[in-house]
Amino acid sequence: MNGKVSMKTIASSLNITVDAVSKALRDSPEISEATKAKVRQKALELGYVKNSLAVSLKTGTTKNVAVFVNDLYNPYFAIMVYKIIRLLDNEGYTGVITLSNGYDLRMNDLSAFFTNKCSMAISLVQPTDEVAKTFAENAIPLFVIGIKPTSDSVNYAITDDYSGGQKAGEFFLKKGFKKPIYLTNSPSETTQRRYNGFNELLAPAIGKEVDYFRFDYDGKSLSDAAKFIKDGGYDFVFCHSDYVAVLLRRVLKEHGLLDDVYLMGYDNVSQYVDLYDPVSSIGADDDKLVKEVVATVIAMHTGKRSPAQPFHKVFPVQLVER
């Protein structure tokens, strides 16, 4: 479509008000999901989102960095966001914390990016292919931490989750446990890599695939998980995160099962904060990870590194017994 595409253009084409379009693009609860879907589709058809990104790029001399996250209850994400914001601040940049909805970073989650005229983004949420393509087409740096993106154009820094799963499996065998299970509340590819390492090391030893239980996302509760663990006679639970491990520990304690089950977490949150009784965990040097990401983001912004030269790095992990 020729000419400037505005919210008024979208409103006219759908015969609704500009205010309704604005609220739909901001995912306001005042607008129905059906109307939101129509507005988003029309915005994409007319090129509104891409035009907004282009404007952001043209005004990209700002030192504003969007930091996308979808969960601040999990201490790991709060810690990582804190580290990112502090490092950016030390370099004269401003981190704009943006909460996205769901497990994917979608086009309609980018409104804060436009509003704050951000020049680049760091995400702890998996971007959709459409988001990745849009950032790449406009040469805007997009970095993902903790999740391996499906698009090679996206910069990423991840921990060696497969190796982490293997380390949990080696610990299981070394300590003489009998029956393992993997517990997660996430549908991400990260959790799959952790399970794959755990399962592929243990399956030959136990003669079967390691059982896998996902709560919350599948409509099952943590109490369902505790009952499943009890009924199945599991004595070792490898949890997707320390947060999951701590939540499970509370439920197992309520059911009088805590002494019968060993919990292994991931992220090693206790190395940074003393939020709760620590669990044995697997984690990386997150300080080093965040420093490299922030340094590379800034290098791309200042032209010292080309956005066409992607940053793809896997950080080693270690197991800490507690």
Image (cartoon, rainbow, N blue to C red):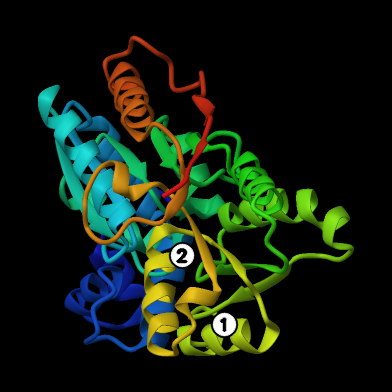
Seen at 53% across and 79% down, the residue is: 215
Q: Is residue 137 left or right of residue 289?
A: right
* For residue 274, above or below residue 224: above
* Of marks 2 and 1, the one in the foreground: 1
State the image coordinates of residue 98 (x, y, percent, origin top left): 24, 55
Q: Which residue matches tag 1? A: 218
Dot 1 lies on which element? loop
User: Is there any visible trace of residue 26 in the rendered image?
Assistant: yes
* Of residues 306 and 166, the one drawn nearer to the viewer in this rendering: 166
Q: Is residue 90 left or right of residue 5?
A: left
State the image coordinates of residue 142 (x, y, percent, origin top left): 40, 37
Farthest residue in the top direction? 304
* Of residues 109 and 211, the one drawn nearer to the viewer in this rendering: 211
Q: Are marks 2 and 1 in contact (CB under 8 Å)?
A: no
User: Is there any visible trace of residue 3 in the rendered image?
Assistant: no
Give the class, few, some or many, for how many residues have Cα within 10 Å of label 2's Cα (few <14, many ≥20): some
Marking on residue 103: 2
Give the class, few, some or many, for how many residues have Cα within 10 Å of label 1's Cα (few <14, many ≥20): few
Q: What's under tag 2, amino acid-wise?
A: Tyr
